[in-house]
Amino acid sequence: MSNEKDFGKTEVTFMFCPKTMRLMGRLHSHRHGQSHSIRPISPCSPKWIKQSLTEIEELILKYAKEGMTTSEIGIKLRDQYAIPLTRSVIKKSITAVLEQKGIKPEMPEDLNNIVQKALGLQKHLKTHTSDRRNVRSLELLEAKVHRLSSYYKKMGRIPETWKYKSVIAQLE
């Protein structure tokens, strides 16, 4: 039987999400979605990284000029150069580096991905008009677009006049 006094003194590190994160659920579903990758515990820079800060920034710029998105750049740095998180190494995020160098994307990546997914669903629904399940999926996606766009308007990442309209999005 353990003592309560001793319990507070022992330090235990868990390999899964903290208790507060396990309670979060998905936006439009009843699932909790606990399966995901876990970031490194320590916020300090790993010792095995051989590149300097300027070399890492140059790699980020090189891949951005090739047309890669910020998440693709992060995956490439992780897989090919063994850089787990750029924020812990260079103390800036990939988007901050790109904004500093003047290569800022017009629309944030997550908003752009949701808009592209909605366009794909609209194209699908043009040919499959009786697909009611995906009609509902499109409604949920458009709700996410409106929610994200209002957030980015408040933050100043997109102009206040930006509006998502399904007909206009198809033309772009």
Image: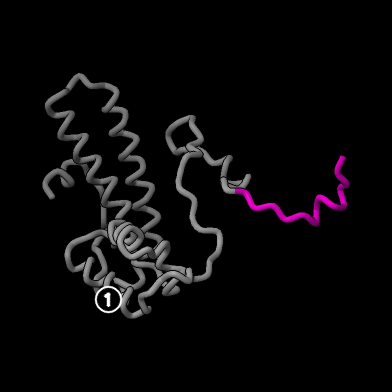
Along the viewing direction, whichever of 46 and 95 lies nearer the viewer: 46
Instruction: Based on the picture, tell me whether residue 10 belongs to the magenta stretch.
Output: yes
**Visible residue check, residue 160:** no
Secondary element under disc 1, as helix, strand or loop, is: helix
The residue sitting at 35% across, 75% down in the picture is 51
Residue highlighted by disc 1: 58
Does residue 24 appear to the left or right of 73 in the view shown? right
Q: Would residue 64 appear left or right of 12 to someone viewing this image?
A: left
Q: Nearer the viewer, residue 164 or 30?
A: 30
Magenta stretch, residue numbers: 1-14
Name the spot of residue 93 as percent of width and height, x first.
39, 68
The residue depicted at 28 percent of the width and 57 percent of the height is: 72
Taking 100 as reference, is 149 above or below it? Answer: above
Q: Residues within 10 Å of mark 1 (few under 14, many from 20)?
A: few
Quadrant of the rendered image containing residue 161: bottom left
**Residue 46 can be seen, yes or no:** yes
- Whole-percent x and y of residue 144? 36, 43
Above or below, 128 against 48 in this view is: above
Residue 78 drawn above or below residue 148: below
- Residue 151: horizontal and vertical position, in percent? 40, 55
For badge 1, the amino acid type reads Glu
Residue at image x 49%, y 55%?
Answer: 39
Residue 71, image quadrant: bottom left
At 51% from the left edge and 39% from the top edge, which residue is drawn? 34
- Residue 59: image x %, image y %? 27, 71
Picture quadrant of residue 85: bottom left
Quarter of the figure with the N terminus: top right
Outermost residue, top direction? 130
Q: Is residue 156 left or right of residue 14?
A: left
